[in-house]
Amino acid sequence: MTDQPYNFAYLDEQTKRMIRRAILKGLAIPGYQVPFASREMPMPYGWGTGGVQVSAAVLTPSDRFKVIDQGADDTTNAVSIRNFFRRTAGIEVTTKTTDATVIQTRHRVPETALHAGQVLVYQVPIPEPLRFLEPRETETRKMHALEDYGLMHVKLYEDISRHGHIATAYAYPVKVEGRYVMDPSPIPKFDNPKVSDCPAIQLFGAGREQRIYALPPYTRVVSLDFEDHPFEASKADHPCGLCGAEDSYLDEVITDDAGGRMFVCSDTDFCETRQAAGHRGKDAA
Amino acid sequence: MSEHTQPLLSVRDIAKRYGSHIGCTDVSFDLYPGEVMGIVGESGSGKSTLLNCMAGHLTPDNGQVIFDTRADGPRDTVTMSEPERRMLARTDWAFVHQHARDGLRMGVSAGGNVGERLMAVGARHYGDIRDKATDWLDRVEIAPDRIDDRPATFSGGMQQRLQIARNLVTGPRLVFMDEPTGGLDVSVQARLLDLLRGLVRDMGLSAIIVTHDLAVVRLLADRLMVMKSGHVVEQGLTDQVLDDPQHGYTQLLVSSVLQV
């Protein structure tokens, strides 16, 4: 049931139009951060205001919507954003990755391969990959414009000199189609290869920073690295405790105060689908 | 000098005004490969304005700065596009700031500071970058085991030497220096000058050094330009200008130096 006082998907049509224009521009220039007039949303900054606005702008009444937070469909943030759109847009919601047409995500790319026709919306806290190296916005914009990206490798150099390897494990910088350096949002670097050459449309929304950027389907996205320290999509070296998957990204869960722990898939839908198909891990009840 | 008929840098009628106030005006000179030019003058005489105009940090109101680029021969850097000018600034040019803090990234290790220019021009092999950084730290007399320390833990003299290493690592042909020895005590100054003189001679660098310290130009510069109130009042060979000053201001400047 749609709550009548609200327009479809909460935002008014003029705002959605403005956001769609930013999205189209972002798709036309993959990896380029398009400024947009971010609106006040009924949730705090840092909870996904950018992602929610992008979702509101792309949702249609026939869409099926899924929200994940760190891979999980059942965390507070995911549940409340899903309810928000069910109430304000009256659309169908789902937890199945394969059934969803629009997926809003925080910090993960679903394990199940996405297909053409799907839209993946990322929540982005800080869209500027150069921000921690160069605090001035005027300067970082100029650096993007002039492809002056030496500084990005300085960050990776510092990682290796301090830790012996590239220790950046999330928000790992990527280069889009050989042009823009982009922050893929704080997804683990394990997910970086999935961002490249993906059949789905990927949209990134940063509400507080008022930026939208996008990757059209089948965009080449390369993780930055050194020749003698190549990029490596790392994960915990265990199988999932519940479904036994060897190739999914894992969360470490502390189970008692005596050092007990287990590793489980962070993507709950992926794990449940596998368990339903009869796969069992060593910790499965 | 006979084979180098082409000047590396030709400055023609450079002028920069700040409103009605004159920064510098009517400055013209040629700098040939391997030559070191000193610019002296009192505070506010337009030395730094001139240097910044030549290095592309300021846009002059008038005039040309023609640099003999490797690829395309002589080009006017004032009318050049910003990407081209930035490319020059990180390959063929170097700029040594008076305060090392302005020229270094204080939050990045010494090795990272030296490596930045290499990575900016496309070096993507960590081992090679590190070897080159180690080599350059050694050349500016910084112990190789300090490579992973941040410049904040370095003394003033070491910071200045690190800044020089960071600038020279890509093998530039022209170095701009803005009071490279300012703010250092005399013994450190002497070592730095010694080092600079060695590097300039070994690498065959051309340099433009702005300073108010006559001892610095006496040691480093082949030619000297004296500025006052935005105008060049006298120029010539360093020894000639310092030993036989013609202009009243130069005479004052030379006689102001305390003879120890």
Image (cartoon, helix red, strand yellow):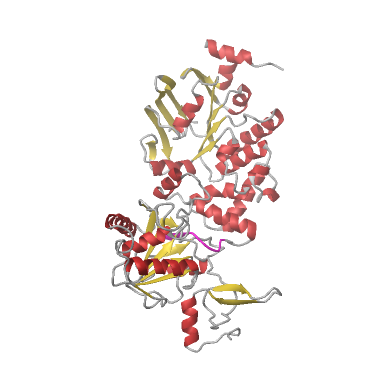
Camera-side residue: B218 or B226?
A: B226
Magenta stretch, main secondary structure class? loop
For image coordinates 29% across by 68% down, the residue present is: A60
For image coordinates 58% across by 23% down, the residue present is: B212
**The magenta stretch spans which residues?**
A168-177
Residue lying farthest bottom?
A278
For image coordinates 54% across by 68% down, the residue present is: A232
Q: Is residue B139 above or below residue A172?
A: above
Report x, y in % for residue B18.
42, 24
Query: Would you say residue B129 is visible in this rendering?
Result: yes
Query: Would you say residue A177 is visible in this rendering?
Result: no
For image coordinates 60% across by 85% down, the residue present is: A282
Report x, y in % for residue B215.
63, 23
Residue A62 sits inside the magenta stretch: no
Q: Quadrant of residue B203?
A: top right
Locate residue B175 relative to residue B184 in the image: left or right. left
Report x, y in % for residue B78.
38, 34
Locate residue B163 relative to residue A103 in the image: left or right. right
Residue A172 sits inside the magenta stretch: yes
Q: Is residue A7 above or below residue B46?
A: below
Q: Is residue A91 above or below residue A16?
A: below
Q: Quadrant of residue A23?
A: bottom left
Locate residue A280 relative to residue A209 in the image: left or right. right
